[in-house]
Every structure is written in structure tokens, then in C-alpha cells.
Image (cartoon, helix red, strand yellow):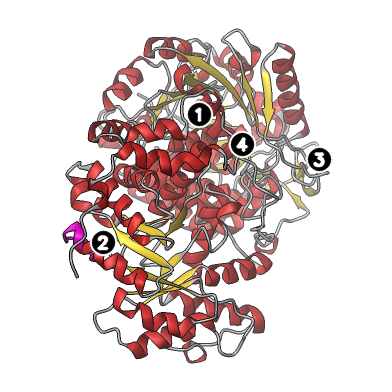
Amino acid sequence: MALAVPLWAKAPCTSRYARRYAPLVTMRTTPPTKTEEAGRATPGAFADVTTSASTLRRFLHGLPGVDAVGLEARAASLGTRSIKTTAKAYAIDLAISMIDLTTLEGADTPGKVRALGAKAVHPDPTDRTTPRTAAVCVYPDMVATAKEAVAGSGVKVASVATAFPAGRAALGVKLADVRDAVAAGADEIDMVIDRGALLAGDYLKVHDEIVAVKEASGSARLKVIFETGELSTYDNIRRASWIGMLAGADFIKTSTGKVGVNATPANTLLMLEAVRDFRAQTGVQVGVKPAGGIRTSKDALKFLVLVNETAGADWLDDHWFRFGASSLLNDLLMQRQKLATGRYSGPDYVTVD
Amino acid sequence: METPASIFAYAPAPESRSVVDIAPSYGLFIDGEFTDAADGKVFKSVSPATEEVLSEVAQAGADDVDRAVRAARKAFEKWSALPGAERGKYLFRIARIIQERSRELAVLETLDNGKPIKETRDADLPLVAAHFFYYAGWADKLDHAGYGADPRALGVAGQVIPWNFPLLMLAWKIAPALATGNTVVLKPAETTPLSALFFADICRQAGLPKGVVNILPGYGDAGAALVAHPDVNKVAFTGSTAVGKEIARTVAGSGKKLTLELGGKGANIVFDDAPVDQAVEGIVNGIFFNQGQVCCAGSRLLVQESVQDEVLDALKRRLTTLRLGDPLDKNTDIGAINSAEQLARITALADTGEAEGAERWSAPCELPDSGYWFAPTLFTNVTQAHTVARDEIFGPVLSVLTFRTPDEAVAKANNTQYGLSAGIWTEKGSRILAVANKLRAGVVWANTFNKFDPTSPFGGYKESGFGREGGRHGLEAYLDV
């Protein structure tokens, strides 16, 4: 396959931004905020932000800083919420419905992917009232197999792309990767950003690459993975969040699950604040997906509390919030069985895949 | 941004009341025994969240104060002569028992005081145990505290504590007193006597010698008698500035050593380069922790005019997520006001604020039918001339003022008769240092608020009192130096 010429190299940024934000003028979902009314922050103003490397840099460095101690304390304090009885039943079903059931291994085979698809459609073979998961998440070459496995169920197929997980490839290769996945039927694309460019301060490169991937994704929803563990500081995570949202991400996602530090309550809280603020200022709602390291129901419920008390109830839906996870599902199922029967079952009463 | 009635409603998650066994009546704790008051008087302790009577408690009078001081005097000779390491053992034992019984004590404190279980469980009780552990460590190291070789204890300490942190204030008073070899007569507040009486039981459980700690539940008259008692060597008081002044007059010329920890009107200063989301958390924690019934509360928000709208919008949005209600529910953020009197005082001051033209805003929340409740409230358009910017409200009421420059922020922050606490919010380290040096407040928090630690001295400037509690500095108040 011939390497594609980067589309973003052809069109001037301004026209792209005019296109992206044109619908906002007529299609807002929230009332204008006080600041917007004062004319200080409008989608139009954000369009200027990405016209050059220096304007984008000034904008990102002008975002309020993040106090690490305070952020982590807030995340920990929300982690002490006690979710019991009816609230727990609601939250467990909600969490199941938000899972992107994931297998991203070199050893993935069609058999493994089919098993995963079956599990996504009917997570608990003993209880058909169990909600299906939101999606299965696979490598691009497994998309076709996954599509077949979940056909007709409503479960989406998400594909990682852009030389996942490192993303260290030429843009043309990344775009080819994306087009391949989309052509195979992927409903959603999980891309990785160029962390090297972000750490080197080349924010516009990160931004324009996301824009290019968004175009290549067509109608597939785009999740942008920051690999927060590699960005290291909360200020970087906030800047990455804004780059992603400005570039047209449908979701911002914490991690690949392939590095030491993946989703944490604190980095997810920070990204929830970002999507909350972005919607307040532009009317555009962006989803959030913590991924990697969320293994227990207790953890998942803590993340749902973060969503509920930070971004709000509008995000409590699988269209706007996802968990990138694999082993989490079985723990949720065991908790669900416990609520139904009053007894803990065991690992033999959920399926291994 | 209004969200529809939350679809993720938290089901009630009450902490079990059965972990604490409250007796129908309690006596005074004098010389290691629970006894009735000399005149047989009793009073009731009420749960402020429900107005339910929790227990009937003996009410100390002047005769009981005398009895308790004599018991403490008798115990002083042996207690102060013990090697420090031996006194330390008792304090370590008390600290461990507090940890073991912390769930029980947390529920008790929540019932008697009205504060949320989240706070008693995660703040009050861990700090109480930490205070005893910390001063237990000092008991055999007093030679190295910086007050010369072999510093001596003062004698009998008369201690009067408030109702806002009943057990924590007890720990702040009793732990350093015992570590340094003093004996104690302590009067808890009349609305919250129960945790001090449970502490008396802990003293017995720890085998503390009789008379070393005496607890006298009672009203102001008992406190006045204790402070005025001629055989008391040291007076420590935490409470209102008015009572503190009265105590200073009583004690003047008596040779008694005095420390006072009084009111405050803390300024929480938010600069335009502050980490906004964390600053909002700090503002909320500063004024709504313990329903604002905190002497070092950040009750004056000084926000730079250029970011006022942004900060206030975020603050109001955050306040709508606060959960007010049953203090025993683990998800409750805002509990009950401690008493009908305090509620009346908060209500009157808030009404004054409105009458003087400040703009009042309250988070929309339903208040329970019984008990004493006040919705989290903030006042905008407040100037230095407003009563709500000057008087201590001691409730969940925040006054918002603006400033233009760092100098103006400092001037306004210091323009108060008090000087207990202040907060600074900025991402600029040099500004933190510059501003903190100019603030006339005993505690200055940077990018945080209401953080406590037994190793850190705490106390006030001006009408917020004098003397320091906590840390190495806290030893001085109980030593003859």
C-alpha cells in the first residue's frame, strides 16, 4: 500500500477549524457560559489557537496549572464514597455496559478474538439480563474477525491503530494503519499520540497528527490515547487533553495498558475536568476512557463516582465513558451474581477467555 | 450547567450505630472514679442532627472543681517524678487504645457533635491518635526540646475546650500536658461531653494512675471556677475571643501560665495563576469542613478580580455537589450545626450580611426536618466594611472579596482583629514565600487548607490568642521555662 500524503500538510489550519467549529454556532447543547457571553472564550477564539505553533503553545501554557497534591487528594476523597445496594446494582450494570473488552497481544488469534466477542455479547452465560459490553477492542488485523463475532449485537468494534502502542512510525504508516482498520469495519479507532513530540514541546505536530487521523477515521469515532504514564506530569496531561479536544477527538483516553502507570483516579479526574470545561466553553461533549489497571468492581465504581461528581450525569453513558479493561468484567460479573443471590460465587462461575 | 436529577443516586450508606454503647447517664471523672456532682445536678447531651437525647451527664460545679483540682494536685507529685520513658509508655498505650476504638469513638463523636462520619473517621480520630503518639515520643526527650536540661512540669493544668473538635481538642490539651509531667483537670463543652467521658474510660483501660486526668463536664460556670482555682498552675483555653479575654483578666497577676487559642477570620487568597480546580477544593475544605465551625476556617475568600468569575462559577458548581444530611451516612459532606444557639448566631449574622447589601447565594439542598441545619452559603459583593467580612461566623458561610494586586491582598488579609490562619493559592513559588512572610497569621497554608499535623505548631496572632499547641513549640506551654 502506498504511503498517503499527509492531508494536514495540504489544507491550511484555519479553514479546517472553520469547518470543525462551524456547526457549533447553531448546534450547541448547553447554554452559553458567562465567559462566553462576555466574548472572551468562544469556539471562534479557539480556532485561532491552532493557527501556529506559537499560538497553540501560548494557549496550552496559559491553562491553569494542576496542583498534584490537591488533585490526588480530591481523587482519593471521592474514592471514599460508599456505593451500596441499589446504587451498587445500578453502577455494576452501568460499568459492564461501558467496557471496551480488550485483547491486545502478539498472541491474539481468531479463536481468542471470537471468544472475546461472544463474551462481550453475553458476558454472563447464566444470566441473560446482563448488559452487553460497549465494544471489543483489538488490533487492526483482528477487526474483521471481531466484527463477525459481534455481528447484530450492538457491540461495537474498536481498533487500536497508528502504530500502537509506541506510535513511533511515520505519519503515512499510521494513517495506513487507521484506514486498514476502518476498511475492515472498525466502528471506533483508538489512536496513540506522539508522546515524543509532546515532550519535545512540538504541540502543533501532536495536534495536526490527530486531525489527520480523525480525517482518515471517517465516520468511526476517534479515541485519542495520551499514554499519561509517559507524559508524567499532570500539567502535560491537561495540555494533551486540550490538544486532543481541539483536534476533534471524540474520546480522550488515558493509556495503552502497555506501560507501568496506566489509568489512575487522579489522571482520569483531571481529564474529566477537561471535558467538562471544554463543553462549558464550546458546547462540544467529548468522552473519556480510562484504560489499564482497572481490575476490580470497587475500582470501577470509584471511577463512576469521579464521573458523576466531576463531569456529571451526562457522561454516565457508554457513549461518553468507557473502561478499557479485560479482567474487570469477570469481577463485575461476580459482584453482580453476589447481589442477585446474596452469595459470592467464584472464578469457576464466570467464563475464562 | 444543570444536570437532570442525578441518575446515579447513592443509596443510604449509614455507619452502624451499634458499634458504640452510650450509657443512659454519666458521672464526673475525678480521681479515677466516675462520681455524681456534689449538688446532684445533671444536664442532657443532645444529638444535633436529630435532637435526640443521647445521655444525661453530671454537671460540675465549684465544689467538684475543687475536688478535681485536689485530686490532680495529689497525683502530680508521683506523676511528675516518673521517668519520662514511663510517662511515655502510658501515652503510647492511650494512643493505641484510641486507634483500636477509633470506629466506636468516630461514631460517638458524630452522634454528639453532628459532624459527618467521613470527617470523624478520616480526620478527627487519626489526628487524635497521632497527637498522643507524637507527644508520647517527647516524654523522655525533654532535655533535647531546647528548654535547657531537665525542664520541670508546671503542676496542675486547668483546660477548657470547645465543642467543634471535642476529642481532638482534648488530645491537643492532654497529650503535651501529660508528656511534660503535669496533671490535668479538663472541662469539655456542654454540648459535647461524651467523647471526653469515653476518654476517661480509656485512661482507666490504660491503667493511668488515679487523679492524673480528671474530666468535668459542665457549663461556663465550671470553666470559670476551674480557671480561677488558686491551686491551678496552668490554664489552657480554646474557644471564643470574648471568653478568652475574660479568662486573661481572671488569670492576670495570679502567676498562672496561660495559653489562649481563640477566634479567627482566615483569609484564603486566590491569585490569578492559581490551580483553579484545586483552589476550589481548598476553598470548599477551608470553609465547609466541619460546617465551618473551625477557628482557623478560611471564611474570607480573597480572589483576584481578574479571575473572580471563573473561580466563583467553578465554586458554585462544586457547592451544588455537596451532600448535606445524616452525619452517620458515609457519603455525607455537610453535617448538622452543633446547637440551636450556634444555628441562631449563624442565621443572624447571615441575615446581617444580606441586610448590609451583600449578595447571598446558597447551594440548593433540602434541609432535614429535625435537628440544626444551615445550607452552605456564600456572600459576594462583600467589602471590608461588611459585618460578614469582619465577625467570626463559625458556620458554613463564606464571604467573597476581591483584590487587584498582591500588596492589596496582603493588606486586606491582615486587616482583621484576628490572625489565626491564611491560605495562598498560586503556582508561583516565589509569590508564596513573599506573601506568606507578610501575613500576620499563625498558620499559612500554601495550595492547601485545613491541613493539621501534630508536629506543626498551631496558634494565633492578635485576638486569635497566644501560645502554640503542637510540635516542639507546644511543649513550652506546659514547662516551667
Residue identifier under label 4:
A31
State whether residue A127 is above or below residue B74.
below
How far, Cα to Cα, is label 4 from label 1?
Answer: 19 Å
- In front: label 4 or label 1: 4
Between B344 and A282, the one nearer to me in the picture = A282
Disc 2: which chain?
A: A
Between B145 and A60, the one nearer to me in the picture = A60
Q: Report whether A11 appears left or right of A79.
A: left
- In front: label 3 or label 4: 4
Disc 4: which chain?
A: A
Same chain for mark 1 and mark 3? The answer is yes
How far, Cα to Cα, is label 2 from label 1?
Answer: 41 Å
Circle 3: residue type: Gly
Residue identifier under label 1:
B311
Disc number for residue B40: 3
Same chain for mark 4 and mark 1? The answer is no
